[in-house]
Amino acid sequence: MSLAIFFIIILFLAAIQTAIPFLTKRTIVFGVTIPEIYINDEQIVFYKKKYAIFVFLISVIALGAYSIWAITSKPTEELIVLAGTVIQFSIIFISMSLYFYFHGKVKQLKKSPKFTKNLKQVQITDITMRSQDSMLPSYVYFLPIIITIGMIGYTISQYSILPEQIPTHWGPNGQADAFTAKTPFSVITLPLVLLIMQIMFLGMHLGTKKSGIKLSATHTTASRSRQLTLRKNTSWLMFLTSLLITILFSFLQFSTIHPNLISDFVMFLVPIVFLIVILVGTIIFALKVGRSDKQLPADIEGDITDYDEDSYWKGGLFYFNKNDPSIFVEKRFGVGLTLNLANPLGYLILILPIIIILLISFL
Amino acid sequence: MIIRVEAESDIPIYTQLINQIIECIARGDMHSGDSLPSVRTLAADLSVNMHTVNKSYHELEKKGIIRIAPKSGAVISSPKTFDPSSFQRLSTEFRPLVAEAIVLGMEKEEIHELVELIISNIKERK
């Protein structure tokens, strides 16, 4: 079982890591801004291919060796989990090292005389674009929150029938394997953690909505399509995740209150279905966003290029721009959003909930 | 309704913003009663400082082109509010340019033609 779960996760991770250079914004190559006219430059296409082939080969070898080892030498479950985790981190580590290697290469390439043609840097926006923004309305994020508040109320009302030992951890088979003593606080810990996660998702949604829709001067149509697709699908993916976590946590909470109501098979199935839906949802998200700006034509006029924001991107990965009031901006390497580290609101949305959850879990 | 600014230009960004918004209205892309994006939104979309956008909006308000209401934000005013003081301000702003044109040898007709050309350029989204 663990082998199957890790195989799927590693396969998914490897596929995404391999495809990243082809799914990112088209004028950003390994975290470096490249003027539109050079995006099909031989050397740049070669770097992207080289990265993808290398990550792909490493992943295939790792996955093959992992499966053969797990099937032939029959190690314990713990060993399979441990090796699977090590492989995941190795793939991330190797692809990040390759990223930095090519980040340096592209940066060097950009300094070469061929690329330093004098282009005027411009920033553009469309002031009527907000009416085309089709992110989910904020109120839908309150629906799972209401469910959770109801669940807390129900748990308190059923306090007397709750067992003396409250589960705090569940194994891969969906059965509880760690417990704590029953107190009015410990019985609602799980829904409380859920509530904070849901509020975090709401915060991320509002933060994204308030953040800028960045258009490119050299491919206005394509960048508009990508930004709007990204915003819409991010809000759907976040809502889906919030909803799925709510369903998963509700099953766990109800199986604690009414141990005989939900069969072992369902408890085993729920986390797996959860995992698969999240993975499939993420793949659909990455493909939809990744393809949204590839088919559309560039609209270059005159000697202009996009404003070079490379100095705000530390290592091409971390965005730090005090002038930009955006909380989230599109990632440079990968598909999705990342924090503007210069905006304190971002820390509030992401770090505060994690601190509260940690406090609740260790209290 | 594309707004375009150049960070490395000699003209400050807030002035570029003012000029771009005024051109949008002059061209007829935006009309009186339409609202402009909030300061925060426009600043985030352009990746510029909120103070820059705020300064542009206040300048536009001073010129009588927009109204800033506490709830509804920045709304484009109706051109009927054009008053003698605006006329006065424009003629002082035109004056040095017209004088410069004369000194550089432009004829009265040429200056008229230039103004005509600029008007048609604005209307034709140039």
Image: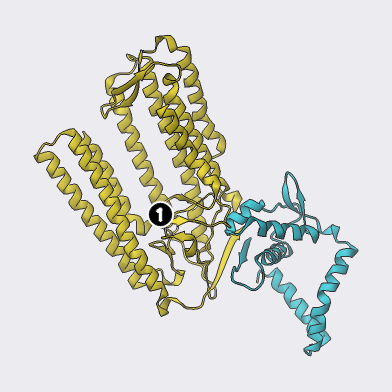
Chain B representation colour? cyan
B80 or A62, nearer to the observer: A62
Circle 1: residue type: Gly
Mark 1 lies on residue:
A290
Residue at 50% of width from left, 21% of height from top?
A150
Residue at 41% of width from left, 50% of height from top?
A288
Q: In the image, residue B72 lies at what x, y percent?
A: 72, 46
Query: Height in image: A142 above or below B104?
Result: above
Query: Height in image: A119 above or below A328?
Result: below
Residue A243 can be seen, yes or no = no
Residue sitting farthest toward the bottom: B105
Query: Height in image: A228 above or below A309?
Result: above
Residue A181 can be seen, yes or no = yes
> How many residues crowd mark 1 within 10 Å: few (<14), some (14–19), many (20+)?
many
Rendered-image quadrant of the C terminus of chain A = top left
Name the side, left or right, on which A24 lies relative to B24: left
Residue at 46% of width from left, 50% of height from top?
A338
Chain A representation colour? yellow
Name the side, left or right, on which A14 lies relative to A334: left
